[in-house]
């Protein structure tokens, strides 16, 4: 019998419909599919909660599923001992009472969480896979540090959200090497959270173009009336915008 992998969850806060609930609860109760619940094949064995929300569900779920709770990230990864004691780490640094900077970005501690995790890896002399929910950080410098540190310690490191893999309605998936010259994605709410989702939805479609993942050569941000002025000047694509909007 193959031994089930042990996962430590490092979480900002855990309440109904938070990212911790949307992700971590599936590792406890199962993954919904068209054919019913798919049972998890790994075990969440350790939980670090940075903040206890007034509507917290993490503490009760930890008790229900026999998950050990720890007051530090190091202790969670080492299961209260001195050596790395898990086979993987799940970082969910979304939601919680954290400050906003002048750009309206939530200063979620994803880099701090990952830095603590890597501290354990470095001191113990080995690394295990890490998944970090959404983008790496609100800061390019912090994101680059995380990337470089993962390479330095040979950490199998992945980040992102489930949106590129979710269902499409109506269904649309371009064939690999599809010719593309323009693309439009529409998202709602603030740039910090849902702007990211709009970009990754666009990316998962556009990367199927001829040449595949060829990267981005330039970025321009327009806000307010400048968006509609650019549309009048045909600097972006009104017909595609109307077609995308028609699907909402």
Image (cartoon, rainbow, N blue to C red):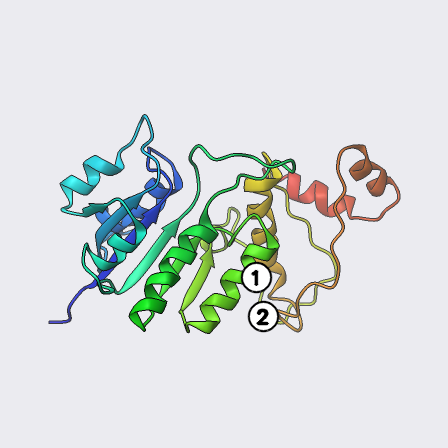
Helix, strand or loop at mark 2: loop
- Residue that badge 1 annotates: 144
Q: Residue 6 in the image: x percent, y percent?
A: 22, 60
Q: Nearer the viewer, residue 38 or 151?
A: 151
Against 123, is 143 above or below?
Answer: above
Percent x, y of residue 60: 19, 35
Camera sees residue 151? yes
- Neighbours of disc 1 within 10 Å: few (<14), some (14-19), many (20+): some
Would you name the residue on which mark 2 appears? 176
Q: Is residue 243 above or below residue 126?
A: above
Residue under the image location 69 percent in, 63 percent down: 216
Give the answer, above or below, for where 55 lies relative to 142: above
Q: Disc 2 versus disc 1: distance between alpha carbons? A: 29 Å
Quadrant housing the C terminus: top right
Residue under the image location 56 percent in, 35 percent down: 100
Instruction: Provide residue 50's location: percent of width, then percent of height.
Output: 35, 40
Tell me where residue 194 sits by quadrant: top right
> Is 116 placed above or below 191 here?
below
Which of the image's four quarters has the N terminus? bottom left
Q: Quadrant of residue 213?
A: bottom right
What residue sits 29% from the left and 55% below the top?
74
- Residue at x 50%, y 50% (from the top left corner): 168
């Amino acid at each position: 019998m193959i031994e089930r992998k042990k996962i430590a969850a490092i979480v900002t806060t855990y309440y109904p419909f938070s990212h911790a609930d949307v992700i971590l609860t599936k590792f406890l109760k199962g993954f919904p599919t068209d054919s019913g619940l798919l049972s998890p094949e790994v075990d969440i064995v350790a939980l670090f909660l940075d903040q206890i929300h007034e509507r917290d569900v993490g503490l009760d779920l930890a008790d229900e599923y026999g998950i050990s709770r720890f007051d530090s990230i190091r202790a969670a990864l080492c299961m209260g001992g001195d050596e790395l004691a898990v086979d993987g780490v799940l970082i969910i640094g979304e939601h919680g009472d954290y400050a906003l900077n002048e750009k309206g970005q939530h200063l979620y501690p994803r880099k701090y969480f990952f830095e603590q995790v890597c501290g354990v890896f470095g001191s113990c002399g080995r690394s295990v896979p890490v998944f970090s929910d959404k983008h790496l950080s609100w800061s390019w410098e912090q994101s680059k540090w995380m990337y470089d540190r993962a390479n330095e310690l040979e950490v199998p490191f992945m980040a992102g959200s489930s949106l590129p893999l979710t269902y499409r309605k109506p269904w649309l998936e371009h064939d690999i090497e599809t010719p593309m010259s323009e693309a439009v994605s529409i998202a709602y709410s603030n740039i910090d959270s849902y702007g990211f989702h709009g970009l990754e939805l666009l990316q998962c479609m556009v990367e199927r173009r001829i040449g595949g993942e060829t990267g981005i050569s330039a970025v321009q941000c327009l806000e307010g009336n400048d968006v509609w002025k650019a549309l009048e000047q045909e600097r972006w694509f009104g017909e595609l915008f109307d077609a995308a909007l028609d699907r909402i």
